[in-house]
Image: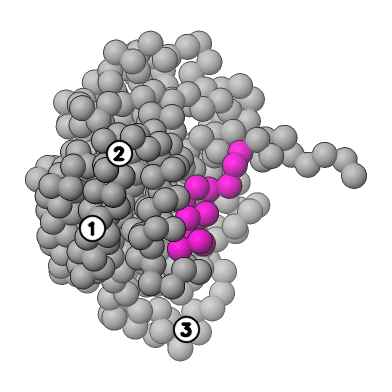
Amino acid sequence: MKPLSQAVASVPPSGIRRFFDVAAQLEDCISLGVGEPDFVTPWHIREAAIWAIEKGFTTYTSNYGLFTLRQRIAAYLKARYGADYSPENEILVTVGVSEGLDIAMRALLNPGDEVIFFEPSYVSYAPCVLFAGGKPVAVPTDYRLGFQPDIDRLREAITPRTKAILLCYPNNPTGAVAPRATLEEIVRIAVENDLYLISDEIYDRLIYDAEHTCVASLPGAAERTILLGGFSKSYAMTGWRIGYACAPAPIIEMMMKVHQYTMLCAPIAAQKAAEEALEHGEPEVERMRREYDRRRRLIVKRLNEIGLECVPPQGAFYVFPSIRCTGLHSEAFTEQLLWEERVAVVPGNVFGNSGEGHVRLSYATSLPKIEEALHRIERFVNKKAK
């Protein structure tokens, strides 16, 4: 047999899924691994999808997505962030942000083009760049500086092959939120070097003690930015696989071509549910955000008491504590914690080399489970310290 794709073969399976699969098979295991809300999609959103099916909305939609949904997305971004997009040709409804990221890379990149992103980073970023023929360039951040973007390192990473800067704030896995001034500086660098910006803002509504800045709303950014957003996290709609991409019309047209030949369109019932989410979902978003905030405060306090130094995250639903005091590497800590105490967390090194010495814990699970998991983690850390 002839060899399979070298690009795909060069990328390991997702480290997040591996631990999730193992944890799912262990009795009495508490998983703080996967970034999925423990809330069920609010009833009125589910009901909207049921209504759509009952009324016969079972067909394809426009490749761009339902126009009515695009209108609501445009209105939401305008009202919330002042970001101005035409529902006619500057918004594309995607199968989650995951697909949006993939087709953004395939629309932008030629072989060898470089994409810079800050690390630790979501596990899909580098593979998506590689699958599109590009070269991922990771710029490390430091937990002692709150995992904030290092502007000097960013400038040093730019080469004649650099095509784009990929941003993710609030950040997965660290929970960092980049200040407006920092993002403005990054936009200036993008303008100076004629680079595209791809801004993954899937966690824009899950933010605490800070303010979210929509990159596309910053001066000079809109014409070179692909804004990626979705419904999975804020509205507890992970399984619906519904997201969107916003960008100038020529970019969206290119992305739509890839979308057209691969996905064709997002599921119509999910699009109807997304319309309902934007129309009437705000109270539920705020209810879930407050609950995440309560859990966040507890988990940060307890981790620091246990001795796992933890920078308070300002967004998303993850904490990324240092485990260096145990003397274990990320993989060893995670493996031993899983088998000895039945708690699943994600090793920091799956988010890039600069994540080594950390683990990611998701607090998108119930408070009693978090409290029990922290009790087990404390027992584990005390045992390793002896």
Residue at image mark 2: 326
Nearest to viewer (mark 2 / mark 1): 2
Structural crowding at the residue carrying mark 3, measured as other residues with C-alpha within 10 Å and reported as few (<14), some (14–19) or many (≥20) = some
- Residue type, mark 3 in image: Ile
Q: Position of residue 322 (x, y in %)?
A: 27, 37
- Residue type, mark 2 in image: Thr
Q: Nearer the viewer, residue 215 or 233?
A: 233
For marks 1 and 3, give the CA distance.
43 Å
Magenta segment: does it hold 329? no
Return the residue found at the far bottom: 54
**Residue appearing at x 72%, y 35% in the figure:** 6
Q: Position of residue 216 (x, y in %)?
A: 29, 36
Left or right, residue 377 beside residue 114: left
**Residue appearing at x 39%, y 58% in the figure:** 340
Where is 199 relative to 205, above or below?
A: above
**Residue appearing at x 39%, y 23% in the figure:** 139
Q: Nearer the viewer, residue 62 or 228?
A: 228
Magenta segment: does it hold 14? yes
Where is 138 relative to 362, above or below?
A: above
Specify start and end residues of the magenta stretch as a single range. 11-23
Q: Which badge, 3 or 2, comes first in the chain's sequence?
A: 3
- Residue type, mark 1 in image: Leu
Residue 374: image tag: 1
Where is 348 relative to 192, above or below?
A: below
**Quick check: can you spot residue 317?**
no
Which corner quadrant holds the N terminus? top right
Q: Which badge, 1 or 3, comes first in the chain's sequence?
A: 3
